[in-house]
Image (tube, rainbow, N blue to C red):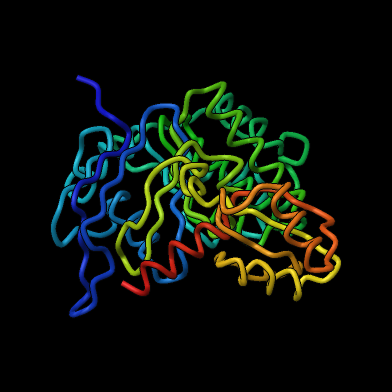
Amino acid sequence: MDFRPVEAVGLERRFGARRALSGVDLAVGAGEIVGLVGPNGSGKTTLLKILAGLLRPSSGEARVFGHAPFRERARVMERARFAFAPPALYASLTAREHLVHLARMRARGMPRAGGAEIDRALDTVGLAERADDRVSAYSFGMRQRLVLAQALLPMPELIVLDEPTDGLDPLAVLELRGVLRRLREERGLAILLSSHLLLEVDELVDRMLVLAEGAAIFSGPPAELCAGTERVRVAADDPGRALELFRERGLDASLDGRDEVELPAGAINLDDAAALLRAGGVELTGFHTRAASLEQALLARLREAGAR
């Protein structure tokens, strides 16, 4: 019988009186990329460590390919790999030496990798031409790709990455994102990653789980988080006077950070807005409807959760 790569139900983890996770559910399907998002201290790393078998949940259940990670960690590691930040590398070794050393140190019962698999892992992450350079000469982005190569040795069915783009410049982020997409598309890997970079999540993942103070406050596709956040934006040559005119009409209007008047979606149409402003001596210069960005929608959801 086959199992989903990751299934967790009602996970809780307490450290004394502090509750790091509170009733969290998570599922990752085969060939799916799922992002774990939340501010520092929200419980992301705690959740990943439970899946890796490094922590026992206080209650609830976690399964990786049908196995309980804390009790059956060796079975989990037959099909899954975990990479936690910061990367643990030796500056005096080459990339190839790192992978050879890793292959020799595999615990009994865990899959071992040969030379062909080492070459393949280095090629997959774009390090084949620098395989025999010492890590001391690597950029931070190259080091992160070497950590990913270690997680691919031998090729797993699931990789779990903790903040894989933390500290990377924009070009290195693009390169790593491309590697992860190829692994999903060409190898069918399931990928679970934690990140605080919303652009990465928005453009890479199929679904996201948002944590705040240990609790899940959203689960679904990134676009779903922005659903229902559409607002009308009106630009005028006198934004302050335009705001007064809309409020005098009884509309819920406010100024946003670009000196545009913001109103609820459907509050007024273009013709009526132009006529209202013209009557008040104001010229309308722009009118459009726009949904909140992923960052705006996430911040709104976090503020809502904090208020509760």
> Which of the two residues, 299 or 232, is positioned nearer the viewer here?
232
In this rendered view, identify the residue nearer to me: 269 or 161.
269
Q: Residue at x 43, y 52 (%)?
A: 36
The answer to whether any part of residue 138 appears in the image is: no
Residue at image point 52% right, 55% down:
195
Can residue 304 be seen by looking at this rendering? yes
Residue at the (44%, 70%) spot, across then down? 303
Name the quarter where the N terminus is drawn.
Answer: top left
Seen from the viewer's position, the closer of residues 165 and 260 is: 260
What residue occupies the far front of the structure in this picture?
279
Residue 273: give x, y in percent of width and height: 71, 55
Front residue (pair 57, 40): 40
Q: Quadrant of the C terminus?
A: bottom left
Q: Which quadrant holds residue 281?
A: bottom right
- In the picture, measured across the screen, residue 76 lies left or right of residue 185, that is left
Q: Position of residue 53 (x, y in %)?
A: 27, 52
Q: Quadrant of residue 79?
A: top left
> Is 140 situated above or below 108?
below
In the picture, measured across the screen, residue 255 lies left or right of residue 3, that is right
Task: Name which residue lies at 60% across and 60% down.
Answer: 263
- Is the residue 202 above or below the residue 85 in the image? above
> Where in the figure is residue 228, as x and y percent of width and height?
48, 48
